[in-house]
Image (spheres, grey):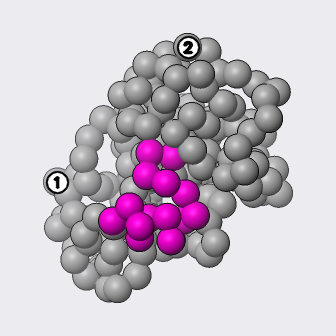
Amino acid sequence: MAPQEGTSLPVRSKEVARVLAEAGVAGQVRELTESARTAAEAAEALGCDVGAIANSLVFISDDEPVLVLTSGRHKVDTTALADRWGRGKLRRATPEQVRQATGQAIGGVAPVGHPQALPTVVDTALSEYPRLWAAAGTPHTVFPTTAGELLRLTDGLLLPVGP
């Protein structure tokens, strides 16, 4: 289903839109009529390749939350990524830890709009797509972006997240 623009956005998405506007990002937050909770759902709703969905995944490493922005086409190899990143073991954050770290619920976590910036990795696979879509604070909101823009917005590190 096509994105709906010009609608009243949820509070979490308004915060993401504010951060994007302050950063000079041209892409607008859009509300979808269908859920984009998973990469497959988002790709179907947007009519794009699942790899062009930038999933925002929260992990705990060295007792702090970290953010991994990964292509929807594959999973994170936590052992390999921790080694590449020079961090301790990565373990998936619980839903409560995700909400505490980001102010957002799993399935709608945006790369930005969190109470405080998180150490972030941007998957090198995202660089293969000229246009990406990322969640905007809820499972029904997204915004268009690029790998370069995600790196700038998050002050992230570009690394492969697979094996």
Q: Amino acid at mark 1?
A: Pro
Residue 52 is situated, as x and y percent measured from the top left of the image, at 45, 32
Q: Earlier in the sequence, mark 1 or mark 2?
A: 2
Taking the image as shown, residue 94 lies to the left or right of residue 26, namely left
Would you name the residue on which mark 1 appears?
A: 163
Q: Is residue 91 above or below residue 27?
A: below
Taking the image as shown, residue 34 lies to the left or right of residue 8, namely left
Magenta stretch containing residue 100, yes or no? yes
Quadrant holding the C terminus: bottom left
Rendered residue at 38%/36% (across/down): 38
Residue 129: which numbered mark, if any?
none
Taking the image as shown, residue 35 lies to the left or right of residue 60, namely right
Q: Which residue is the extreme one toward the bottom?
A: 63
Specify the segment rendered in magenta: 94-108
Q: Is residue 108 above or below residue 44?
A: below
Residue 11 is situated, as x and y percent measured from the top left of the image, at 72, 50
Would you name the residue on which mark 2 appears?
A: 1
Q: Amino acid at mark 2?
A: Met
Magenta stretch containing residue 4, yes or no? no
Label 1: how many Cα within 10 Å (few below 14, some 14–19, many 20+): few
Rendered residue at 62%/58% (across/down): 112
Is residue 51 visible in the rendered structure shown here? yes
Taking the image as shown, residue 77 lies to the left or right of residue 131, namely left
Query: Image quarter for residue 135?
Result: top right
Query: Image quarter for residue 31?
Result: top right
